Amino acid sequence: MTPEANTDRTQRALAALAVDAGGLKGLTFRARMGPARQAFETALRKLPGPQHRIHPAITDDQLFGGLNIAASLAEGRPVRDAGLADQPTMLTLTMAERTPSGLAARLAQLLDTDRGHALILLDEAASAEEGAPQALLDRLAFHIEPKEAATPVRLPAAADLDVARKRLPRVQIPDGALPMLVTLAARFGIHSLRAPSLALRTARALAALDAEMTVTDAQLQEAAELVYPSRATMMPTEAEDEDETPPETPEPDQANAPDTDRDQSLTDLPDDILVSAIAALLPPDILDRLAAKSTRPANAAGSGAGDRRRGNRRGRPLPSRPGHPSAQARIDPIATLRAAAPWQTLRRTGRNADRALVILPSDIRIKRFEDRSDRLLIFTVDASGSAAVARLAEAKGAVELMLAQAYARRDQVALLAFRGTGTDTLLPPTRSLVQAKRRLASLPGGGGTPLASGLMAAGDLAQLARGRGLTPMLVLLTDGRANIPLTGDPDRATANDDATRIAASLRAQGISGVLVDTSNRPTDTARTIAVALGARYLALPRADAHGISTAVTSALGA
């Protein structure tokens, strides 16, 4: 599709939305910041009615309103703040790919109330695996993905839009329009009944824009082309030829059926016109997109980045600070009263003379807590042949001592060992010191040094730990002499490249730790891995288990 044709579809979609925003619910515009996005937002601001921009981090109080505690305390009576959803408005949600599931559910419920609200999703997802929540996409009429080239989006004049809105309730729908749209949706694998309903409302809005009092075939076709392509889940197949001729039916009386030509043309549209027209508008990578959606985890959040990390402990209290109460910020009553007490004599004047206590919004103090998430120490031990010949016994002793110290601090520990061609998880995250010692004692030595495999396994375990609210830290004991790459075939140069690349990836993820060079004669190989990993490098050529343990514990504490 040419940029001009794509712009025409965008203009018609925006014009239809301006005529029937409450019925069409809104649209999704998927593009990163650029000329096309700028042209769209410029046209969006010209739509009639109130508009508000919101963020995925918007609170329920801002969206739906709620009790204003500060004003209620000042007035001595309940005072409610109005929310953006109290009046029909068009909400523009930026960074829609990061919408949390809770906000998506509340916005979907708001759209289902049919109170005239509309929603514009500005989706900046970079891949097919990301995107706005499906619950919102299903409720919005249009999905627009512009081309690189951008042309200005022009809308009808405001007076023409007003006339079209007044004409909309009088626009008639042919009898065969809805069954035809439902049949067409089934041909493209669209199972939601919202799609035919939105297509029908789009056709009515387009008819009102074209000064038509009855929806025409061209408007039905255009509506289907605007609504169906983004929802298609399969390519249409050719209809099977019928061997048997349909039975002849008596011709109706011409006086009693003046509109049979129109009805007959509507029933012919799916097979003759609309299927090929919509198929031409389907994205060329539709099969890849469907595959990406099917492989996305069911419990994945709407966006794929920016989630808050939740600690698994409440934490110790910090001094209260002035602020506004909300669902995430609770009032500290004692601190609030302490802040208001010195001013009571001055405040008991005028209408406040009879009040026992006068609290102003500036007196409110909010509770604060320090997040004290548990720490997970991921011990990744080199059990290869070179390490076994050199210092594997001392490394085992040092790990055992550090495990005991971690147990005393109530840290969780995990134990990984890499040797041969892969990595074994000898101990998943636990606080069981007895089990950790037993697994460590049975750690064999010998084989190649798959350092890249060990780093990758440690990174995967660290990501799982963060999902559980833990703070992962890596303790890597190795001589740094990698000789087995991720492919499993012996190749020292490739193995060093793989290890350095994965170490840099772990550093980008913010995983901190310590690398202990366990070789008798330290070289620059292990130091290079430590630099790429962003970890503290400890070369302890002559230290015993106690020396290694003390140095690592000091480094982790620092």
Image (cartoon, grey):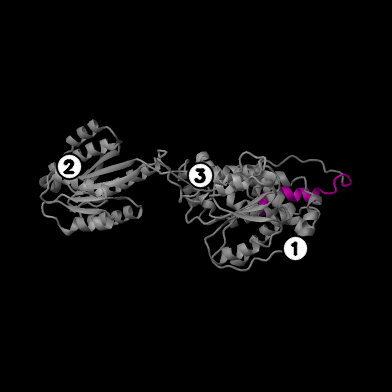
**Label 2, label 3: how far apart the Cα atoms are:** 45 Å
Label disc, if present, on residue 398 of the rendered structure:
2
Quarter assignment of residue 406 = top left
Q: Is residue 6 magenta?
A: no
For residue 190, side relative to residue 221 (left or right): left
81, 272: nearer the viewer = 81
Closer to the observer: label 1 or label 2?
2
The residue at which mark 3 appears reads as 366
Residue 140 percent location from the top left of the image: 63, 49
Q: Residue at x 62, y 47 (%)?
A: 347
The residue at which mark 1 appears reads as 158
Closer to the observer: label 3 or label 1?
3
Residue 428 percent location from the top left of the image: 29, 37
Q: Which element type, helix, strand or loop, lies under badge 2?
A: helix
**Label 1, label 2: how far apart the Cα atoms are:** 77 Å
The magenta span reads 254-273
Q: Residue at x 18, y 45 (%)?
A: 550
Q: Residue furthest front?
A: 345
Residue 499 percent location from the top left of the image: 26, 54
